[in-house]
Amino acid sequence: MHLQLLSDLHLETEVFTATPAPGAELLVLAGDVDSSWDGLAQFRDWPVPVLFIAGNHEFDQRELTQTWPALRERCAQLGIRLLECESLVVPDRNGKRIRFVGTTRWCDFDLFGPAQRERAMRAGSYFMKVMLATRNGAPFDAAQVREEALVCGAWLRQELQRPRGAWDATVVITHFAPSLRSADPRYGQQPGTASFCNADDDLLPMADLWLHGHLHCQHDYRVEHAGGSSTRVVCNSRGHARKGEADAHQPHLVLEI
């Protein structure tokens, strides 16, 4: 299957018009498309199926418990398939069955280990103030983000540990990155990086391809595993053009799985 990947378009402030990539059989939106949700309308009547994973900014100034059903309804109106702690098997044009496993996978702040968790959560407090979201009426702070992360992280682990079923390959889609390898080279191993990456490296062998966003940079690397298998990890974030983050973005990037 040939997949087009877009994320971090930030259409609430950026000017960008998405167009279908030639040859793509499915479009993946890996989050932070538009905090206002208006930009999602670009993907109405897209010529191929669209899978969407919500990013953190889809929740800006919103109440989480109300946002999920509202966002799901909005996506349904546009013909977009929202995945949150859900998997979906889609056959390609040749009959190969691809399992898509999707969740926002919030950060649990354990990127550098439990001993550094408190420091990472303090660094992440700025990130939460930018969102100004709530959860059950309380500020969606680092502690609440971690609670959400533990839930979706546990689901992701359980789903990936399922015995191989009616699928031939697995694609994981998260907004947050699965490994420190995806850190933005501008910031490296700072405590704040734990707001962008999780230490899900032990899950990588269970996926053939892992797609993510959130980092405003581009990545395409392969992780080799014992026994000869490997996992390709790709991020095709656009980010903010005013910061030069969009310079290397590939609007028609197509990945084969």
Image (spheres, grey):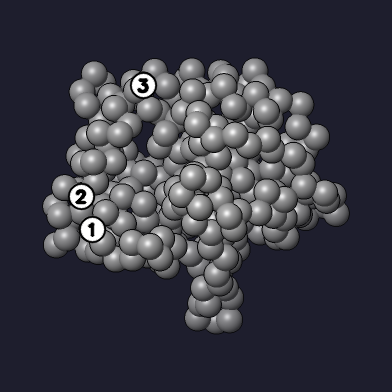
* Identity, as a three-letter code, of the amino acid under mark 1: Pro
Residue sticking out furthest to the front: 242
Q: Residues within 10 Å of mark 1 (few under 14, many from 20)?
A: many
Which label lies toward us, 2 or 3?
A: 2
- Who is closer to the viewer here, 10 or 221? 10
Q: Please say if 245 is above or below 181.
A: above
Q: Which residue is at 30% across, 34% downward?
A: 130
Name the residue tied to disc 2: 123
Q: Is residue 181 left or right of residue 51?
A: left
Position in image of residue 89 (x %, y %): 67, 45
Sequence-wise, the earlier of marks 1 and 3 is 3
Tell me if residue 179 comes above or below residue 228 in the rendering: above
Percent of width and height locating residue 113: 22, 63
- In percent of the image, x 61 and y 45: which residue is there? 6
Tell me if residue 74 comes above or below residue 249 in the rendering: above
For the residues labelled 1 and 3, say whether their Cβ atoms are less than 8 Å apart. no
Q: Which quadrant of the figure has residue 139?
A: top left
Residue 153 seen by the camera:
yes
Q: Which mark is residue 191?
A: 1
Q: Are marks 1 and 2 in contact (CB under 8 Å)?
A: yes
Q: Residues within 10 Å of mark 3 (few under 14, many from 20)?
A: some
Q: Label 1 vs label 2: CA separation?
A: 6 Å
User: Which of the numbered marks, if any, corresponds to residue 62?
Assistant: 3
The residue drawn where x is 29% and y is 66% is 189
The amino acid type, in three-letter code, at marker 2 is: Ala
